[in-house]
Image (cartoon, grey):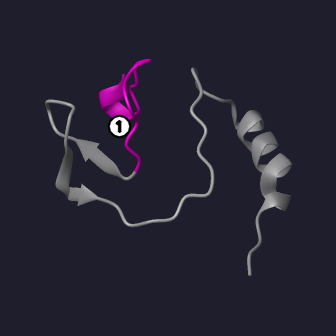
Amino acid sequence: MLELWGGLDTWGDSPVAIASQWEAGGFDLTPGLKGNLAISRVRIHDGVLTDEQIMSNYLEETGDFSSA
C-alpha cells in the first residue's frame, strides 16, 4: 500500500528524511532530490489520522504560528 501513495515507512532505529530521499543503502541522501523549505513542526504517528483528528490538531496549534 505504501508504494501506491508514497507513504512514509519507518522503523524504530531509522532516521526520517523530510524533503529528501535516501539512497538504496540507507546511509546517504540523494543529492538531486533534496527540498528547500522551512518546517515548523513535524509529527509522526503510528497510524493514519482521521480528517477530524487532523483538523483538531490544526485548530489546537494554529495560535502558535503567525502569518506575518
The quarter of the rendered structure image containing the N terminus is: top left
In the displayed structure image, the side of residue 24 where residue 61 appears, left or right: right
Q: Is residue 25 above or below residue 17?
A: above
Q: Is residue 58 above or below residue 64?
A: above
Q: Which residues fall within the magenta stretch?
A: 1-18
**Mark 1 Cα-neighbour bin, 10 Å: few <14, some 14–19, many ≥20:** few
Residue at 57% x, 21% y is 46
Residue at 30% x, 29% y is 3
Q: Position of residue 35 (x, y in %)?
A: 34, 61
The front one of 46 and 41 is 41
Residue farthest toward the left in the current orientation of the protein:
24
The front one of 32 and 14 is 14
Please tell me whether the stretch drawn in magenta is mainly helix, strand or loop: loop
> What is the secondary structure assignment of the residue under circle 1?
loop
Residue at 14% x, 30% y is 25
- Residue 5 colored in magenta in the image: yes
Q: Position of residue 6 (x, y in %)?
A: 35, 37
Residue at 62% x, 57% y is 40
The front one of 59 and 28 is 28
Residue farthest toward the bottom in the current orientation of the protein:
68
- Residue 11 colored in magenta in the image: yes
Residue receiving disc 1: 6
Q: Position of residue 53 (x, y in %)?
A: 75, 34
Total numbered circles: 1
Name the image quarter holding residue 15. Answer: top left
Residue farthest toward the top in the current orientation of the protein:
12
The quarter of the rendered structure image containing the C terminus is: bottom right
Q: The residue under label 1 is which amino acid type?
A: Gly
Name the image quarter holding residue 44. Answer: top right
In the displayed structure image, the side of residue 43 where residue 34 appears, left or right: left
Q: Is residue 65 above or below residue 25?
A: below
Name the image quarter holding residue 47. Answer: top right
